[in-house]
Image (cartoon, rainbow, N blue to C red):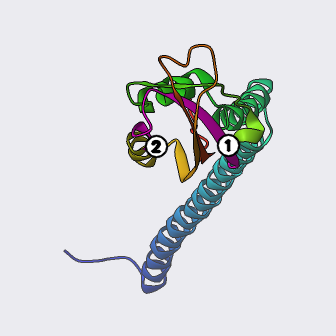
Amino acid sequence: MINLMPYDMKKQTIAARINVMLFKYVVILGFSAVFLVLACSVTYLFLISIKANAENQIKINTTSSPIQKQANIFRTNLSVAQSILGQQVNYSDIVMEIGEIMPEGMVLDSLKLDDSTFGTNLVLKVLSTSADNETKLKHNIEGSTLFSNYKFQSTNSSTKDDATKYSFIIEVSVTVNRKVTL
């Protein structure tokens, strides 16, 4: 095919095509720039909303609600009650254990237990049918966790009216250990 267009016109047509192509590139570049600005703006707004939600969640978690305050008060009261119960002594269990320690043929004359008794020396007056029962008593007390520091003090003949059955009075000194029960 023969091109019959004059040289100037041909040059102008080529320049017009290049201008149209450059214009398309400029428009595409403009749309790309607008798209990038919009994408960055949306991402920025999204990050700001996430940050605000996180700060609100932190504020909610750090400030105590009324239920949280009640739970904290309950925890404190529970720890106080636990410490009180941790020091409680059940005297009936102690008396039952003393009864189990006593060998056959021996009874306590009297017993006084209170908070001041624990950790100090306590003199037990025991009525016995035989003076030999003292060794059994010593063996039972030393095997018990309730008493420590067993010391024999004296053995006397009883002058009570019921002397026929319990004819001996044995006095021993022991330290009563605190036995904690829950």
Per the rendered image, the range of residues in magenta is 118-134
Local SS, label 1? strand
Tell me, yes or no, whether the two marked residues, 2 and 1, touch with CB atoms within 8 Å: no
Amino acid beneath label 1: Leu
Q: Decide which of 168, 28 is in the foreground and name it.
A: 168
Residue placed furthest toward the top: 161
Q: Is residue 13 visible?
A: yes
Question: How many C-alpha atoms fall within 10 Å of the one at disc 2: few (<14), some, or many (≥20)?
Answer: some
Q: Position of residue 143 (x, y in %)?
A: 39, 46
Q: Which mark is residue 141?
A: 2
In the image, residue 39 lies in the stretch drawn in magenta: no
Q: Is residue 60 visible?
A: no
Q: Position of residue 72 (x, y in %)?
A: 74, 34
Q: Which residue is painted at 44% across and 26% down in the image? A: 129
Q: Decide which of 101, 78 is in the foreground and name it.
A: 101
Q: Which residue is painted at 69% across and 38% down in the image? A: 83
Q: Which residue is painted at 71% across and 51% down in the image? A: 48
To which residue does mark 1 refer? 122
Q: Decide which of 30, 16 is in the foreground and name it.
A: 30
Q: Decide which of 101, 156 is in the foreground and name it.
A: 156
Q: Position of residue 51 (x, y in %)?
A: 70, 51
Q: Position of residue 128 (x, y in %)?
A: 48, 29
Amino acid beneath label 2: Ile
